[in-house]
Amino acid sequence: MDKICLKGMSCDELQSWCLEAGQSSYRGQQLFEWMYRHGISSFEDMSNINTKFRNFLKKNCIIQTLKVVKILPSKVDKSTKILFRTIDGQFIEAVSMIIRERHTVCISSQAGCALDCGFCETGRMGLMRNLSTGEIADQLIFVRNHEKQPITNVVFMGMGEPFHNYDNVIRAADIFHSPRGFNLASTRITISTAGILPKIQQFISEKQRYKLAISLNAADDVSRTSIMPVNKKWSIGDLIRAGKEYSNLKKRQVMFEYVILKDINDSEDDAYKLAHLLKGIPCKLNIIPYNETDGS
């Protein structure tokens, strides 16, 4: 019999599951807090749950979705890259970045990616599968347990296109935001997309509380299409309009990301085009130096 994975369940789901298992709904709240607030990896550590129920949990459930394969500290700053392996053998990465009091964790939402952006190493892999809510949450749990400095920000900017795994990403963000989970302010959680327009519109219509980042990377459609095939489907104009709509929401400000690529999008003319595109939109612009990889 396959064991049930509790990691990734919401508090309501855990409460319902506990009732079905003959326990009180309060046990579900306890499980939620043990997994996400305390970040435990063993049922034995759940000290306020009786032995009989703990034995039931050990026999029928799992709460660990990832195994750490390698931890790679940076030689130039206080960044650390962590390589994980999933239960079915997929490899994903998360990055911990510490700059003074700010501790940002960049997490993955997919194993691989289907978008094939020309500057992205993950895109060369193709898409293996979406990550579960539990696999997304476990990345943050490990970093929190591994690093002494408290996590202040989470960005969905690792492997994969977050809006191709929309439901699990939002569920994970809700766990990060929950006072019984990680208790991170919604403004400390940023979800980045390469421009999946229907999901951006869904994100806006649902009035999601989290911050939106759109990976622009060019100031005209010809240049953007050459490095981001998704632009054939949804153009820069579509994304600018969506970003403006998001920024019109109360207390919202879209972020546009722009990776600098030599002789592709780094000219003075590109800068003027970009300034013209973003004029009048309450936004932030994140200029990112390109991180070269082998074979790129």
Image: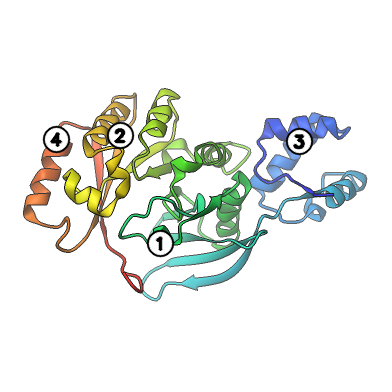
232 shown above or below 78: above
The answer to whether the residues at label 2 and label 3 have Cβ atoms under 8 Å apart is no
User: Which amino acid, by three-letter code, is at mark 1?
Assistant: Arg
Q: Secondary structure at mark 3?
A: helix
| Circle nearer the N terminus (1, 2) | 1
How many angstroms separate mark 1 from mark 3 (CA)?
A: 41 Å
User: Which amino acid, by three-letter code, is at mark 2?
Assistant: Gln
How many angstroms separate mark 3 from mark 4 (CA)?
A: 49 Å
Q: Residues within 10 Å of mark 1 (few under 14, many from 20)?
A: some
| Circle nearer the N terminus (3, 4) | 3
The answer to whether the residues at label 2 and label 4 have Cβ atoms under 8 Å apart is no
| Circle nearer the N terminus (1, 4) | 1
How many angstroms separate mark 2 from mark 3 (CA)?
A: 36 Å
Residue designated by label 3 = 28
Residue designated by label 4 = 279
In the picture, the quarter occupied by the C terminus is bottom left
Q: Secondary structure at mark 4?
A: loop
Q: Secondary structure at mark 2?
A: loop
How many angstroms separate mark 1 from mark 4 (CA)?
A: 34 Å
Q: Secondary structure at mark 1?
A: helix
Residue designated by label 1 = 124
Residue designated by label 2 = 253
